[in-house]
Amino acid sequence: MAPPPPRDPAALIERALCLVVEDLAACERRFAELLCSEIAIIPEVGGHIAFAGGKRFRPLLTLLGAAAAGFDGPERLTVAAVGELLHTATLLHDDVIDEGEFRRGRPASRMRYGNGMAVLAGDYCLARALQAVAYTGQPVAVCSLADTVTRMAEGEVAQLDGAGRFSLDRERYRLVIDRKTAALIAWCSSVAGLVEPELVEPLRRYGHEIGHAFQIADDVLDLRPAPAGPGKQPSDSGKDPGQDLREGKMTLPIILACETDPGLRQRVCQALQAGPPMSEAVVQELLERIAQTDAAERALDEAEAHALAASRALRALPPSPARDALHDAARYVVIRRR
């Protein structure tokens, strides 16, 4: 009988990492190769965020998914590296769109290199990702990536289109997550569709549910205050605290808080009508009022339900240490925020 999973988030993910440590090292080398360019400023801008301490969660799911499905083709390393490269592209673009100042606990790339350079470096990451997968010569991977990138673009547009509007529409919120976050994680966990056909859908479903759990948990973290200290500082997420509120994004914990407190609902509506970005004073006021509700715990309950659904999807895979590690990763997504 396998030992029970540890309750400490760091120990939980460490157990998963240990299973694919050599593949992760190879993936990191491949990732660095894909960031290279004769135009020296490109890897400098991309590397500012890419090597700033990210957890490489998407490559981890790719490599564990491949191991659980018995797929050892060299393409798994390219898929793992491309997943992180696409994630890097979205972060570079998001910080420009959202006017974010912090990312992974340090100034965002746009703060150091400017908005234009950050956008173009993100475009390069996207182009190299498409190129790398095309060069594998695997039509399934190429087509699945094309579909995924299209959904990601739809998610970004849907989120920006809804920013600044007061809406308690949970379905729209889920649609944004489905396309912006879950689509990429599902592509990664299913190894771009390269595993045995009968295992593609279970692994894709696993990643889809993990994507929802991951984003909801991050949205909860966004509403927690910044660490005490002089000057503006990043929160535990490495981003500006209250960034979603500042941009007028109605995330699940904000929606739940507004449903719980009619007075808060009216105040948020008024703040959004004044037009984003909200002032720091208003953001802090709203953060304090949201914290007085049970919205964060209720949102995390929903994230946990998605994590459990992800684990159920794994029943289609044969028992293995890699499958156990995928279960651990599903638990990690939620308990790292509990």
Image (spheres, rainbow, N blue to C red):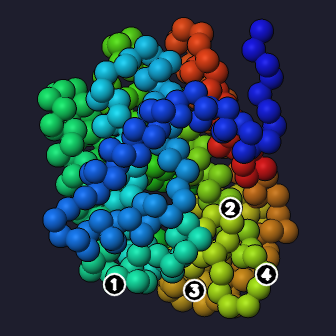
Three-letter amino acid code at the position of disc 4:
Ala
Which residue was labeled with disc 1? Answer: 114
Q: Secondary structure at mark 3?
A: loop
CA separation in Å, label 4 and label 2: 16 Å
Q: Secondary structure at mark 4?
A: loop
Residue 282 left/right relative to 316? right
Q: Are marks 4 and 2 in contact (CB under 8 Å)?
A: no
The 10 Å Cα crowd at callout 2, few under 14, some 14 to 19, many 20 or more, is many
In the image, residue 310 above or below residue 223: above
**Residue 246 lies in what quarter of the image?**
bottom right
Residue furthest to the right in view is 292
| Residue at 52 percent of width and 85 percent of height | 277
Q: Earlier in the sequence, mark 3 or mark 1?
A: 1
The 10 Å Cα crowd at callout 4, few under 14, some 14 to 19, many 20 or more, is few
For discs 1 and 2, the disc positioned in front in the rendered view: 1
Three-letter amino acid code at the position of disc 3:
Met
Residue 190: x percent and y percent? 40, 28
| Quarter of the figure that contains the N terminus | top right
Which residue was labeled with disc 2? Answer: 221
| Residue at 47 percent of width and 38 percent of height | 24
Total numbered circles:
4
In the image, residue 274 above or below residue 76: below
| Residue at 46 percent of width and 71 percent of height | 163
For discs 3 and 1, the disc positioned in front in the rendered view: 1
Three-letter amino acid code at the position of disc 1:
Gly
Which residue was labeled with disc 4? Answer: 228
Three-letter amino acid code at the position of disc 2:
Leu
Query: Closer to the camera, 302 or 200?
Result: 200
Residue 29, label in figure: none
Residue 188 left/right relative to 290? left
